[in-house]
Amino acid sequence: MKIEVITLHGVWNYGSVLQALATQSFFEQLGCTVEFINYKRNDFRSIGNYLCYTCKDDPFLKSILKSLVLLPTVIHWKRMFGIFCTRNLNISKREYITNADFYDYIPQADIYCTGSDQVWNSTLNNGTLPHFFLDFVPEGKKRISFSSSFGKELLDDWEIDEVRQLLNRYDYITCRESSGVNICHSLGLKQVHRILDPTLLLSSKYWKKFVRNRPVKQKYLLVYQLHKEEGMDDYLKEIAHRCQLKIVRVCYRYDEIRKQGYSLLIPTIDKLLSAIYYASLVVTDSFHVTAFSTNFQKDFISVIPTQQFGGRIYDLLTLTGLKARAICQFDDFSPLDNIIDWQYVERVYDMERKTTTRFFEKMLKDK
């Protein structure tokens, strides 16, 4: 069977491209042919558009300066993530930019799938994007969602009716977080299931084939920080001192090189996975780096973001019995005294993988 997937593969960040690769691999293991709809959001189509999107909430002068600082980084992102996607993902040759494109050039498939990541997050998407809800799919064709996420606990009032109408057309709905299942239930949708993020549906054995060399010879504390958090640097310094570890920091942008620690400057996907794999301890506020830390069975501390969208980390840690590895304040060193029961974590993942595989095997057979 051929499955057409729409997801956030074209967004320039590690989690988005890794979940896309995992989605493709999962369905290929079930014997399917997978193709990603080459959707390019207007504000991500070109470097200039992306910079305008990134800096849109800043005053004019600050926006200009920020754009100049970010320009080398964005050029690097576009090239690096573009190469990875071209080499590893099956992407349609036709580009889809406007919603009309989806109706004018409907991709042909047996099954249409809304992929994982925060595809239904109206905050990040600047509104409800109908194509992420498969509104273009002809009647009689099977519609599914695969570990899709709203990225928040509740819908805004303005989007409730529209989202209910769009989701009512799906044959199978699976969400990445329990909060997503709860949102669907609140809309009157009953047959909704929570499954793991696609990167976790593949075992560490799959991801180890991307692992290369250690980033440094010494034992190290790996830092992957997405959000600005006051007190984080002092916390990292104290953790490194207590554990006698060298600080190695993933610098997602060129201007982050000034931060403390040995810098991994915009590493390739292979280098990022290698850095997680060889780390003695990982400290992160990223969902996907938390996920890979648990998959590689690495000691870790998850910093729950104070800004927004931290629920997905808590949801994963609750499922795996790892809530004691999360902190909300930078005077909390208790995770260092918490011993992780990796056998329990692996049993949870093994059960989730088997249940999800059986679910989608049945879905493929259903007419």
Image (spheres, rainbow, N blue to C red):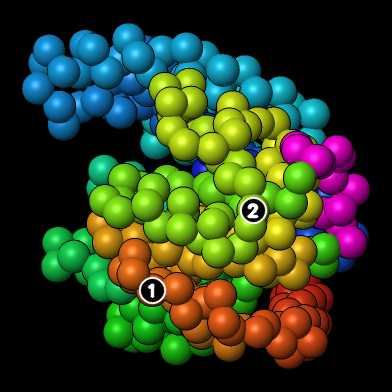
Q: Position of residue 33 (x, y in %)?
A: 83, 50
- Report the front residue among 151 and 135: 151
* Residue beneath disc 1: 332
Q: Earlier in the sequence, mark 1 or mark 2?
A: 2
Labels 1 & 2 near each other (Cβ < 8 A): no
| Region of the chain picked out in magenta, as a range | 205-217
Secondary structure beneath label 2: loop
- Position of 2 compared to 123: left or right? right
- Position of 188 compared to 223: left or right? left
Q: Position of residue 240 (x, y in %)?
A: 55, 55
Please give the name of the residue rendered at 39% of the width and 36% of the height, measured from the top-left corner: 99
Give the amino acid at mark 1: Asp
Closer to the eye: label 1 or 2: 2
Q: Main secondary structure of the magenta part?
A: loop
Q: Is residue 208 magenta?
A: yes
Specify few, some or many for label 2: CA neighbours under 10 Å numbering under 14, 14-19, or 20 or more: some
Secondary structure beneath label 1: loop
Image vertical order of residue 68 relative to residue 100, above or below: above
Image vertical order of residue 153 relative to residue 224, above or below: below
Q: Position of residue 47 (x, y in %)?
A: 43, 15
Please give the name of the residue rendered at 19% of the width and 18% of the height, measured from the top-left corner: 63
Quarter the C terminus occupies: bottom right
Q: Position of residue 317 (x, y in %)?
A: 53, 78
- Position of 183 compared to 25: left or right? left
* Residue beneath disc 2: 245
- Report the front residue among 11 and 217: 217
Quarter the N terminus occupies: bottom right
